[in-house]
Amino acid sequence: QDEAIGERALKLKQLAETLPRVKSTAMILGLCEKGSLSFETLEEPHKSQAETLSRTSLRAAISAGRGSAIAFVSQWEDHVSIDAVVVNPQYLELGEAAEAVLLADIAQRARAAGVADVRLHPAYQADGAAFYERCGFVAAAGGAEGAPLRFASGSEAPEVAAAEPAAAAEAVAAEPAAATGPAGAEAGAAREGAAEKQGSTDSTSDPRA
């Protein structure tokens, strides 16, 4: 991958480390949605995350064969939490664009639902904090290191073309694994797990990716 050099090589390394975990989470969400598993009977390491998982849905910005991003989003009484975001490892730069669109869409949906507090657990980015600042997410004043970023109340999330909340499962399933090697295989498996969770998944179209 020509673009996986310098800072993006570190991004690719993090993706390779993260994808097995999100694959496992996506599969559990799918099985619980189908009724094959129950959040109440999960074993560790997922047992301690059962409440969060029960509140989690998958959101996706999909461009078949190009940049794509999938987010794990949990809904709470007083806030929305973006717990993880992964992109197609074969198209890192386009994946970053898809991620930006996806973050904007999640923030817009939260605002529309009357939720002002949107939190984000950031991943490694080639542009560092500047990437998230462009998306409207900043560190809270006085926040501890490693604390979630917050969507700034005065931020205007960029307009995105959002599809009707419906066929995210189809959109996720339509995106081929494409990338070669372990990272690509894990990305495909994560998308397959995402496709299982049809009832609570949203789809975001990214015309730019």
Image (cartoon, rainbow, N blue to C red):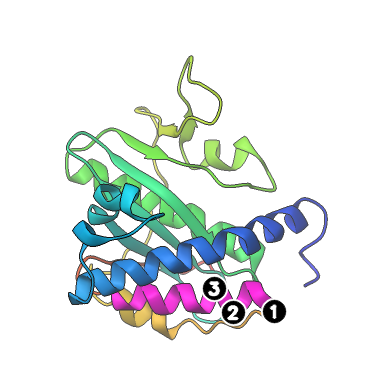
In the picture, the disc for residue 125 is: none
| Residue sitting nearer the eye, 45 or 143 | 45
The reply to whether discs 1 and 2 touch (Cβ–Cβ < 8 Å) is yes
Residue 164 is covered by the magenta coloring: no
Secondary structure under the numbered disc 2 in the rendered image:
helix
Residue 169 horizontal side relative to residue 186, left or right: left
Q: Amino acid at mark 1?
A: Gly
Query: Which of pointers 1 and 3 lies earlier in the amino acid sequence?
Result: 1
Secondary structure under the numbered disc 3 in the rendered image:
helix
Q: Amino acid at mark 2?
A: Ala
Q: CA distance from mark 2 to mark 3?
A: 5 Å
The reply to whether discs 2 and 3 touch (Cβ–Cβ < 8 Å) is yes
Q: Quadrant of the N terminus?
A: bottom right
Q: CA distance from mark 1 to mark 2?
A: 6 Å
Which residue is under mark 3? 187
- Which secondary structure is most common in the magenta stretch? helix
Which residue is under mark 1? 181
Secondary structure under the numbered disc 1 in the rendered image:
helix
Which residue is under mark 2? 185
Q: Residue at x 66, y 75 (%)?
A: 182
Q: Which residues are magenta?
A: 180-196
Q: Amino acid at mark 3?
A: Ala
